[in-house]
Image (tube, rainbow, N blue to C red):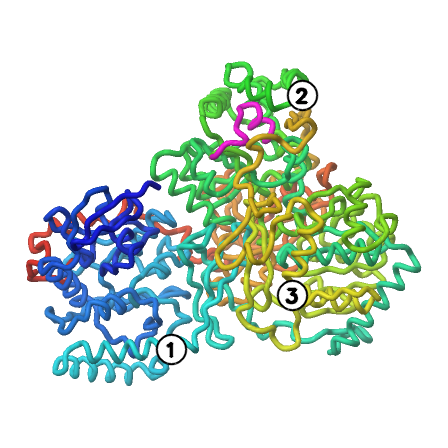
């Protein structure tokens, strides 16, 4: 940004140009009072406290941007009077009782501004509003009596989260913030993302976990608190406000030593949100996002903001368990680790290294993933090491690596926001990756981005899209090939880019010849006109991004479809530039990092092939061992390990933080396989379904009880810090693995995760410049990172990491799915995530609020099928596949139609995978979870309550507006611009 020079109060100041004056002043150490302004929200102009004189005219400093040569007064009598009038109006709507307020914690903008301004007396009498406090949400409250109508929450909801639930109606006799125009919070479209609570500058919106927990006087009963407030306000009228404010400032500082604020990174989806976790001892007070967070800024979702009860759950494992005589007994660490070391070495020495399989955790840290694969390769001597990406993202990673070179996002979330067109395929982004969805919804709402959604289910992003296409299940590859041919046929292919940067062009173009629009329409069910329109949109886009997820990858040819997406981007020249590229959404918080750091059957950390002699030589040298001691052939992944166990070829497994017994396809076979193992070790926080089959259970820790790093979906490496010590006798996974290695005779001497990262960075070129120092605080790096610490915001700017620096158009052809519907099994069962829960619910299932929002599972069917089968919301049905059956309630919804049904993957154990089969993608062995044909049979059973409660956000009615209607406030007949006094300040 360019610099400019201003004259402020007779002094010459220099700073950034074209920024709000309030920020310019802050850069120069000048504090201009302001309440409604927040950088992430921009100027709302409702609080009337940030006045300055600009070239002799009174203006709000949040709404005027710095320009060279401005003459500004920030200390004139007119400015002071205007600011005080603005604050007086706010105080008429807000009862200051800070010393007994839960929000007097140092971050209360209202309190701090009153203290900074030295307000001596409240000119306008505070008047209560005729509304009750809204306590309907399981997570937060809204108190209209404390609301100052600043509009921060509305702006955040409308234009940051873009859920468009909150509004303010300044025409009301007693204005207040409204949910869906006037519904209780928990009966509205509110998704409980917490944006509104995060940005509230006072205590009008407050987390339930903050109530009665945050200060020495907040524990008192409500009736006593009320009498203390009344007494305080009486004293204030005689002494003036400064004495009371001074006491509240003392109270604010009194609280600080007891409230710990620690930066951490979310352990749910792959977005990689970071924030402060506020704690008092082991009590989690709240999650507080900050503007400096590189991925999410002030944004969160329901899980990241509120679903942390699992940390202190009484179901947490606190000590090792050993199975004895068919039951578990407690053991100390020495006994447990000695037994694990002894048994694993016995199996290795008796049956060979490849008789053991290790599954690393996609929720543990990069350092822990690194040690898991090192244990497998250096100590066991096998490449049988994998992580949960085998169940979701391996097809995308392989599809991208064989076309562009890296199996990861081509750019940043920021690049997604910059695109002209974003195509989302098989990605329920708003529920699976909500903060990324918010960024996309914001770009779309601002009008500079077009969205095309292609899915079998009409989820939120589909309803918002410019164009929603609903092809037949498992036919995505066909339309991608047709649209790619369309680019060549209609002159949209970037021939210059292809000539310079891509190989295999002529061969691929020949392979596209069969994929006419007519042929593809017949295969996909899309019309020729729809396909042509899609081809035109793709061809005319200057910057195109494609987003996809498990709706693509969990098919029998997910790898080929992922390759086809990449090929289409290459043909149109949409790689290597900002605002372009491929974006396979990563599901778990560190599924990208677990793969990056070597929990793969065929790759070392940094994606060095295990079959490459030079790579083996480098890793052997780094680990101080002989190259020939490292296994030279690829191992088995999760899916094949379980099959090998079922055949009794695999004798032992070590599963770290994964719910394999729940997540792997064809549950009956998985459970049978686990019972046939000679020895099973499970390392987890809970006695999971998988742990129930174990011989030894080792209690690991969640991320908030250790330090480490994660990699998010955009390749961003971030550091997290220990918030609280491990619970009971549990241990961080990196320490467990280090101790186990020592029990197995290997002198691992890691004392801190930073030493593990340093070791990896010294061996892997991909992470050469990564260090904890360079990741300190809110800093982050996107790999590859060179030795100087320079990272790579977007890939392929100059070359592709393939032969001759060129990408490759990978040859493909359409193939039908491995399982289809028929007369006996007429429905195709789609499945996926819901916003409120995560995976097997071992974490979100410990939070009462998320359970209340979605208490049970269900099957979605469309109104057409419901009518034909005489089913209603809450009707019971039996859902059967070719492998098994289960009984659930029906949810009738227009999200699906015809012979497509949908079930969430989270609830019920053994769960959905009683229905799924072992047919899989032949390239990467990912089960084809989405290719499950079922029949649905009504049960003669009394109808129950609707499986989605009537108050679930999906039944709400959003109220989209452009932003806070401050102009309506200014147009009120009794509104006067400060410093003039106002007759009814409580109204606006």
Task: Determine the image quadrant of residue 737.
Answer: bottom right
Nearest to N terminus: mark 2 or mark 3: 2
Mark 3 residue element: loop
Q: Residue at position x 39%, y 51% from top?
A: 955
Question: In the rendering, at what x and y percent does residue 950 appear?
Answer: 41, 57
Residue 617, above or below 112: above
Mark 2 residue element: loop
Q: Based on the picture, tell me whether residue 569 belongs to the magenta stretch.
A: yes
Choose mark 1 or mark 2, whichever is in front. 1
Nearest to N terminus: mark 1 or mark 2: 1
Which residue is situated farthest in the right direction here?
350
Do callouts 2 and 3 mark residues in contact (Cβ within 8 Å)?
no
Q: Residues within 10 Å of mark 2 (few under 14, many from 20)?
A: some
Residue 685, above or below 784: below
Nearest to N terminus: mark 3 or mark 1: 1
* Mark number, residue 255: 1
Q: Is residue 98 left or right of residue 751?
A: left
Which segment did they paint magenta? 566-578
> Which of the two residues, 212 or 23, is positioned nearer the viewer here?
23
Choose mark 2 or mark 3, whichever is in front. 3
The residues bearing labels 1 and 2 have C-alpha atoms spaced at a distance of 66 Å
* Mark number, residue 752: 3
Mark 1 residue element: helix
> Which of the two residues, 720 or 836, is positioned nearer the viewer here?
720
Choose mark 3 or mark 1, whichever is in front. 3
Q: Residue at position x 58%, y 69% from top?
A: 705
Q: Which residue is mark 2?
A: 504
> Which quadrant holds the C terminus?
bottom left
Question: In the rendering, at what x and y percent does residue 260 appear?
Answer: 46, 72
């Amino acid at each position: 940004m360019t610099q400019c020079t201003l004259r402020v109060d007779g002094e010459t100041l220099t700073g950034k140009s074209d920024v709000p004056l309030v920020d310019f002043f802050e850069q120069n150490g000048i504090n201009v009072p302001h309440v409604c302004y927040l950088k992430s929200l921009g100027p709302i102009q409702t609080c009337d406290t940030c006045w300055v004189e600009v070239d002799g005219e009174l203006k709000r400093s949040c709404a005027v941007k710095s320009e060279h040569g401005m003459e500004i007064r920030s200390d004139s009598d007119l400015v002071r009077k205007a600011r005080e009038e603005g604050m007086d109006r706010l105080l008429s709507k807000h009862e200051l009782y800070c010393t007994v307020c839960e929000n007097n914690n140092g971050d209360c903008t209202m309190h701090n501004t009153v203290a900074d301004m030295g307000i001596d007396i409240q000119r306008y009498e505070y008047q209560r509003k005729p509304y009750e406090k809204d306590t309907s949400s399981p997570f937060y409250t809204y108190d209209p009596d404390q609301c100052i109508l600043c509009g921060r929450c509305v702006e955040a909801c409308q234009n940051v989260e873009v859920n468009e639930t909150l509004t303010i109606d300044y025409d009301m006799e007693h204005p207040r913030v409204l949910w869906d125009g006037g519904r209780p919070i928990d009966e509205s479209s509110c998704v409980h993302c917490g944006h509104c609570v995060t940005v509230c500058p006072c205590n009008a919106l407050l987390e339930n976990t903050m109530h009665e927990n945050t200060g020495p006087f907040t524990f008192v009963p409500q009736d006593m608190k009320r009498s203390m407030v009344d007494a305080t306000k009486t004293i204030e009228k005689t002494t003036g406000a400064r004495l009371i404010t001074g006491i509240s400032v003392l109270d604010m500082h009194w609280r600080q030593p007891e409230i710990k604020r620690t930066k951490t990174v979310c352990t749910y989806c792959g977005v990689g949100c970071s924030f402060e976790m506020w704690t008092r001892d082991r009590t989690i007070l709240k999650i507080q996002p900050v503007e400096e967070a590189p991925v999410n800024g002030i944004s969160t979702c329901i899980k990241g903001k509120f679903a942390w009860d699992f940390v202190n759950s009484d179901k947490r494992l606190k000590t090792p368990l050993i199975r004895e005589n068919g039951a578990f007994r407690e053991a100390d660490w020495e006994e447990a680790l000695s037994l694990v070391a002894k048994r694993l070495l016995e199996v290795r020495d008796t049956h060979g290294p490849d008789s053991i399989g290790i599954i690393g955790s996609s929720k543990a840290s990069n350092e822990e993933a690194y040690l898991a694969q090192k244990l497998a390769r250096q100590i066991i001597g096998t490449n049988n090491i994998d992580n949960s990406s085998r169940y979701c993202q391996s097809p995308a990673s392989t599809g991208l690596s064989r076309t562009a070179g890296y199996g990861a996002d081509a750019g940043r979330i920021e690049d997604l926001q910059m695109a002209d067109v974003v195509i989302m395929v098989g990605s329920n982004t708003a529920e699976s990756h909500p903060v990324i969805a918010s960024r996309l919804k914001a770009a779309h709402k601002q009008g500079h981005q077009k969205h095309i959604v292609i899915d079998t289910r009409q989820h939120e992003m589909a309803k918002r899209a410019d164009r929603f296409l609903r092809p037949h299940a498992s036919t995505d590859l066909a339309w991608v090939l047709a649209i790619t041919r369309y680019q060549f046929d209609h002159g949209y292919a970037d021939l210059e880019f292809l000539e310079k940067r891509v190989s295999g062009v002529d061969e691929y173009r020949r392979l596209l010849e069969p994929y006419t629009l007519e042929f593809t329409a017949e295969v996909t069910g899309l019309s020729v006109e729809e396909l042509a329109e899609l081809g035109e949109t793709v061809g005319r886009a200057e910057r195109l991004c494609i987003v996809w997820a498990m709706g693509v990858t969990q098919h029998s040819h997910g790898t080929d479809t992922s390759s086809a997406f990449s090929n289409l981007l290459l043909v149109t020249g949409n790689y290597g530039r900002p605002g372009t590229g491929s974006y396979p959404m990563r599901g778990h918080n560190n599924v990208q990092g677990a793969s990056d750091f070597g929990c793969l059957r065929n790759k070392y950390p940094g994606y060095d092939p295990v079959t490459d002699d030079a790579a083996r030589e480098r890793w052997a040298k780094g680990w101080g061992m002989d190259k020939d001691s490292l296994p030279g052939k690829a191992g088995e992944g999760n899916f094949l390990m379980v099959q090998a166990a079922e055949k009794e070829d695999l004798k032992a497994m070590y599963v770290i933080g994964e719910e394999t017994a729940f997540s792997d396809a064809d549950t009956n076979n998985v459970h049978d396989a686990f019972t046939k193992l000679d020895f099973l070790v499970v390392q987890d926080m809970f006695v999971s379904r998988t742990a129930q089959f174990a011989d030894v259970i080792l209690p690991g820790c969640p991320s908030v009880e250790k330090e480490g790093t994660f990699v998010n979906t955009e390749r961003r490496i971030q550091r997290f810090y220990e918030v609280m010590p491990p619970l009971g006798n549990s241990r961080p996974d990196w320490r467990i693995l280090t101790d186990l290695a020592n029990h197995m005779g290997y002198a691992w001497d890691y004392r801190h995760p930073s030493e593990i990262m340093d070791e990896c960075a010294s061996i892997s070129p991909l992470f050469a410049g990564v260090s904890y120092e360079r990741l300190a605080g809110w800093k982050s790096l996107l790999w590859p990172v060179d030795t100087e610490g320079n990272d790579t915001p977007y890939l392929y700017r100059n070359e592709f990491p393939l032969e001759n620096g060129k990408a490759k158009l990978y040859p493909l052809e359409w193939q039908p799915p491995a399982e289809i519907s028929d007369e006996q099994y007429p429905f195709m069962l789609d499945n996926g995530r819901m916003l409120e829960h995560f995976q097997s619910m071992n974490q979100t299932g410990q939070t009462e609020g998320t359970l209340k929002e979605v208490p049970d599972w269900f099957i979605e069917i469309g109104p057409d099928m419901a009518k034909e089968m005489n089913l209603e919301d809450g009707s019971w049905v039996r859902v059967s596949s070719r492998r098994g059956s289960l009984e659930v309630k029906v949810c009738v919804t227009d999200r699906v139609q015809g012979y497509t049904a949908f079930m969430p993957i989270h609830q019920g154990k053994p769960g959905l995978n009683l229905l799924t089969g072992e047919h899989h993608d032949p390239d990467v062995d990912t089960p084809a979870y989405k290719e499950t044909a079922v029949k649905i049979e009504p049960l003669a059973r009394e109808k129950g309550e609707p499986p989605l409660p009537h108050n679930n956000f999906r039944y709400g009615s959003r109220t989209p507006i452009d932003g806070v209607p401050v102009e309506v406030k200014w147009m009120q007949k009794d509104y006067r611009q400060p410093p003039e006094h106002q007759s009814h300040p409580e109204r606006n």
